[in-house]
């Protein structure tokens, strides 16, 4: 990519955890960052980064499961161009919950946040991503239909498989865009748990390095935070 001081990234789902870690990582590289949170002003972590980064960090409200909220964000961004659109927003069902036990509402919520919302956001904001830019989604090895899955997280895993499939469909009509389905590793976040072996900063740095190294390569790649390709 070009000189980092000239570049802008939008991180959707940045109020905490890995999303917040990505914001901090890109700020440390001199990028301009637009970070979204579901409720404006709710993230103490983002507020702290704003106090340190000043104009380099812009925070916007976005409920990724709400199509009107996505449209409102596009309107507020106006004619702004971004170099990387990174869709990090995601939720999980309980790790030991069987698919037959999940409520209709929770199933719809997981798929709305993890699948439909990210794809709607990409469709809406892709016109403001520069031609040399990158569109990335946070996927998971659990979404691979080739790898042997561990037990648990049945609905979450299915949602990531669906996200991967829809990204592949999108890639067929995205021309020469660089598209990434990124696997962050098992990270110590609220979702990953305290026993996870990878800290947020390590994963965030690796993911940012992958985005940089893969920029300019047309098509969609499923890749982890250490830049290793993954099977679909």
Image (tube, grey):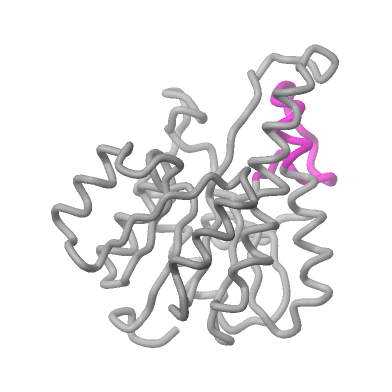
Residue 204 in picture, x, y percent from top left: 41, 53
Residue at 82% x, 54% y is 165
| x then y, percent, for residue 121 | 62, 59
Q: Residue at x 43, y 39 (%)?
A: 198
**Residue positioned 75% across, 83% down in the render:** 175
Residue 209 seen by the camera: yes
Number of marks drawn: 0
**Along the line of sight, which residue is nearer the eye, 90 or 213?**
90
The quadrant of the image that shows the N terminus is bottom left
x and y percentages locating residue 131 in the rendered image: 58, 86
Q: Is residue 156 magenta?
A: yes
Q: Is residue 178 above or below residue 132?
A: above
| Side of 137 relative to 51 (left or right) | right
User: Left or right: where does residue 137 sit relative to residue 2?
Assistant: right
- As displayed, is residue 136 above or below residue 151? below
Front in this rendered view, residue 2 or 80:
80
Q: Residue at x 71, y 85 (%)?
A: 176
Segment tinted magenta in the rendering? 140-159
Instruction: Give the quarter of the image for residue 151.
Output: top right
Farthest residue, direction left: 52
Is 207 included in the stretch rendered in magenta? no
Return the x and y of residue 140 as percentages of the image width and height.
Answer: 65, 44
User: Taking 206 as reference, is 112 above or below it?
Assistant: above
Q: Nearer the viewer, residue 230 or 172?
A: 172
Residue 204 relative to residue 31: left or right: right
Q: Quadrant of the C terminus?
A: bottom right
């Amino acid at each position: 990519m070009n000189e980092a001081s000239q570049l802008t990234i939008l991180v959707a789902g940045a109020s905490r955890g890995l999303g917040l870690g990505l914001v901090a990582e890109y700020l440390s590289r001199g990028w301009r960052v637009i970070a979204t949170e579901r409720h404006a002003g709710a993230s103490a972590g983002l507020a702290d980064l704003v106090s340190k980064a000043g104009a380099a960090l812009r925070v916007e409200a976005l409920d990724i499961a709400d199509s009107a909220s996505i449209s409102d964000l596009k309107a507020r961004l106006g004619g702004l161009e971004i170099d990387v659109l990174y869709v990090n927003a995601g939720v999980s069902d309980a790790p030991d919950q069987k698919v037959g036990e999940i409520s209709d509402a929770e199933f719809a919520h997981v798929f709305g946040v993890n699948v439909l919302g990210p794809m709607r956001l990409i469709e809406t904001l892709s016109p403001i991503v520069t031609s040399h830019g990158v569109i990335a989604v946070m996927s998971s090895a659990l979404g691979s239909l080739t790898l042997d899955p561990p037990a648990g997280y049945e609905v979450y895993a299915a949602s990531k498989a669906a996200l991967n499939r829809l990204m592949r469909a999108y890639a067929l009509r995205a021309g020469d865009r660089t598209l990434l389905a990124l696997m962050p590793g098992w990270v110590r976040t609220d979702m990953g748990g305290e026993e996870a072996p990878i800290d947020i900063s390590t994963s965030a740095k690796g993911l940012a390095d992958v985005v940089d190294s893969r920029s300019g390569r047309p098509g969609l790649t499923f890749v982890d935070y250490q830049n290793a390709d993954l099977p679909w």
